[in-house]
Amino acid sequence: MSYLLENVEARALELGATKVLSINLVMGDRSTVVDDSLLFYFDMLSPGTVVEGAKINVRRTPMRFHCAYCKDDYAPISENFDCPRCGNVGQVTDDGSELLIESIEIET
Amino acid sequence: MSVRTIQIVQNILAVNDEVAAQNRARFTAAGILAVNVIASPGAGKTSTIIKTMQALQGRARVGVIEGDIAGTIDTEKVLAAGARDAVQINTGGNCHLEAHMIERALDALDLHQLDIVFVENVGNLVCPTHWALGEQIKMCLSSAAEGHDKPIKYPEIFAASDVIVLNKMDLAEMVDFERDFFVKSVRALNPHAPLFEISCRTGAGVAAWAEWLYSQRSFRAPNRASHTALETVSRL
């Protein structure tokens, strides 16, 4: 969380921002970051900084697998990684690995 | 006063990754193979490091960076078992090691006296996965006693690792460990990483794993996790 704050704070100050209105993040399910803990730490660490009061928007991207038989991607069910259509096991794709600051909205 | 939206698209852990790259350069310059050992508490991280070190006795000089929330018990153990050098990092509550902690530990190690450095991460299968430390090999250690569903519950560490070691295989039958299910799940996440089955208690499989590791001393590929992040950024 402090990495996220420092990143945003540095960029905002560099751009001459007086206030950060929102922070838009992309968090893949594979990144295992939980929205609630993110918001909890944000509320704890942001007061007194230029990002205080900013709205955090999180876009989640799911983990997906590719089935070579169905030639299609699928989200796994919870018990295994098998393709829900044909029952064969696929290969994980890169989807859902993101851990990114996509954009920030600032007031100057 | 005006409101602007600024596109950033930056990996949140970019700062950590920069320090990790510097650590990797230091390991590489000293001719050291660095291994980031990631596992749950109780999987046998310290035992596996000790058994591997003993299997390579007289061939590889081993150093250990021990990451724990508190205490020095593991550092004492690896030194008593023959590690050439060891440094303890107490994270003081942090659930994972970060690259800047390794940077400080490197100052305390006599790098030119070592061939392999194991970094024993804090026992946790989630957070350590995302923090590159500067290792050349990210190692996921799992154990039969933890159950065959570990890859389903903690997919990212199995997907991101360069090698997977499965310990306590002497207990597999007693704990109803379904080996085929485990292997199938691992392969869905990571088709190429070598998978070694060992038992630190009986010593079974340790020699094959240690030989593979020894053969990787010329391995210089970049860390998979940072790689993925970079690819993600370039794709967006």
Image (tube, coloured by chain):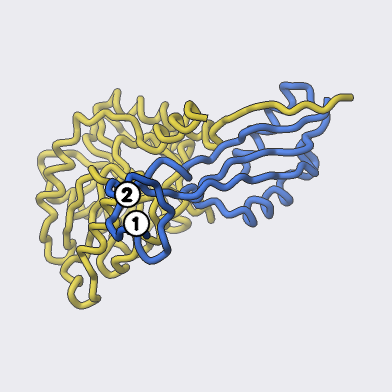
10 Å neighbourhood of mark 1: few (<14), some, or many (≥20)? many
Q: Secondary structure at mark 1?
A: loop
Residue type at numbered disc 2: Cys
Residue B204 at x, y percent in the picture: 10, 60
Which residue extends farthest right?
A: B1
Mark 1 belongs to chain? A
Quadrant for the N terminus of chain B in the image: top right
Residue at position x 33%, y 65% in the image: B149
Q: Which residue is mark 2?
A: A70
Mark 2 belongs to chain? A
Q: Which chain is yellow?
A: B
User: Viewer-proximal residue, B180 or B119?
Assistant: B180
Chain A shade in the render: blue
B15 displayed left or right of A84 = right
Image height of A44 relative to A22, above or below: below
Residue A83 tag number: 1
Q: Looking at the image, do the residues carrying marks 1 and 2 touch, with CB atoms under 8 Å apart?
A: yes
10 Å neighbourhood of mark 2: few (<14), some, or many (≥20)? few
Residue at position x 62%, y 40% in the image: A25
